[in-house]
Amino acid sequence: MRREIFTEEHEAFRDMVRSFIAKEVTPHHEQWERDGVVSRDVWLAAGRQGLLGIDVDERYGGGGNTDFRYYLILDEELARAGAHGPGFAVHNDINGSYLIRLCTEEQKQRWLPGYCSGEIITAIAMTEPSAGSDLQGIKTTAVRDGDDYILNGSKTFISNGILADLVIVVAKTDPSAGAKGVSLLIVERGMTGFERGRNLDKVGLHAQDTAELFFDDVRVPSANLLGEEGMGFIYLMQNLARERLSIGAAAVAGAEAAFERTLEYCKTREAFGRPIGKFQHNRFTLAEMKTELTVARAFTDKCVLADAAGELTAEEAAMLKYWNTELLKTVVDRCVQLYGGYGYMTEYPIAKAYQDARIHTIFGGTTEIMKEIIGRSLGV
Ligand SMILES: Cc1cc2nc3c(=O)[nH]c(=O)nc-3n(C[C@H](O)[C@H](O)[C@H](O)COP(=O)(O)OP(=O)(O)OC[C@H]3O[C@@H](n4cnc5c(N)ncnc54)[C@H](O)[C@@H]3O)c2cc1C
């Protein structure tokens, strides 16, 4: 089916993104997988190419274009290329929304130019060793002391955690006030008492740095408070729909790419004297996947348009994230089966896709939490 949500400008942008990935990402990705982290150069290259801070005002070096579809095109193309290393989606789609919406003028001038150029890489730190889904259970505290906050606690599983120069940290400024006592603080590289743990060893996403962060009496100036004190939980809830739209859109793009690759394989790989795709079981498997992907694509694009119109609800974003990430998981699993033993060899992209897919039903809110959000909206 022809997609109807993009204009000629979007398609020209997609071509540019493809060239960028072919030149700046794909040739280096295997090395980054071995390193467990991408180079800072690819961030700077993305900055030069105008791929960071597309929605940031031009006064701060951004693209001045608030159409979220540009980010989704970047997400789709990275997913299609199997290039999970560069954490651009966390930076652009998630963290940028906080910075643009909540920064004071002084903060914007301080951070946004570097954010757009790729010199300031960002992360967001919500999850803690004892609290992931249950965000209200976080233990990190920020206690006011004169003009500063004294930050104590630890975070884990933080994407861009090794490279990050600026981390949006979720902390309790009033532990007795429940959700109303949560605030967002910006912690910067080099602040005394801010340490990184190891780059975590993961099942997939090997080129993506994911780290533990430790805060030991870090003195964070109140000038680094993001938005209003006590509003952190509300800010998080307001941004999560976009985060889930990004993850869902990338998931279906990744699943489509895995499917297309596998379809080609089924046409060329022979067994018992004919291409394996000619066996009815395999043809039905391919037909089922194609149908499921086509249906998911239709809903995804509808959600993209709803978001562009400012109408995407938290429940719809949760449905998209739940459906597309579960679909990605089953599609890559079936594709591996169709590849036979080669599907288990990491030199084959389908094997990497299998490893990389697994996390999608967990991060950004698990499938179970998505179902909770949807279920609650049904009044049950
Ligand atoms: C590679 C990677 C990157 C990540 N990036 C970031 C990041 O950049 N920033 C960040 O803050 N976090 C990040 N995370 C953390 C991620 O968002 C959490 O792992 C996720 O939200 C789940 O939290 P948890 O791991 O504590 O699991 P838990 O919350 O302990 O959940 C364990 C299981 O219990 C289920 N469960 C929990 N509550 C309920 C419930 N009410 N009903 C039914 N089932 C329930 C869950 O669905 C899950 O199956 C990342 C994680 C990974 C692995």
Image (cartoon, rainbow, N blue to C red):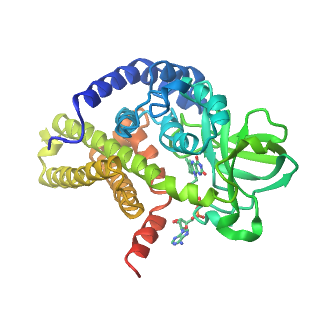
Total marks drawn?
0
> Quarter holding the C terminus?
bottom left
Taking the spot 66% from the left edge, 35% from the top edge, the residue there is 107
Q: Is residue 273 left or right of residue 258?
A: left
Nearer to the camera, 345 or 99: 99
* Relative image position of residue 85 (x, y in whole percent): 51, 33
Taking the spot 70% from the left edge, 64% from the top edge, the residue there is 181
Q: Is residue 309 left or right of residue 52?
A: left
From what the image shows, is residue 229 above or below residue 107?
below
Question: Which residue appears farthest toward the front when viewing the image?
Answer: 105
* Relative image position of residue 167 (x, y in whole percent): 66, 41
Nearer to the camera, 133 or 266: 133
What is the quadrant of residue 153 in the picture? bottom right
* Relative image position of residue 79 (x, y in whole percent): 38, 38
Taking the spot 70% from the left edge, 51% from the top edge, the residue there is 155
Nearer to the camera, 60 or 54: 60
What is the quadrant of residue 275 in the picture? top left
Quadrant location, ligand no. 1: bottom right
* Relative image position of residue 284 (x, y in whole percent): 15, 54
Task: Say if residue 364 shows up in the picture.
Answer: no
From what the image shows, is residue 279 above or below residue 269?
below
Task: Say if residue 23 shows up in the picture.
Answer: yes
> Quarter holding the N terminus?
top left
From what the image shows, is residue 230 above or below residue 162?
below
Q: Is residue 313 left or right of residue 302?
A: right
Q: Is residue 149 left or right of residue 186?
A: right
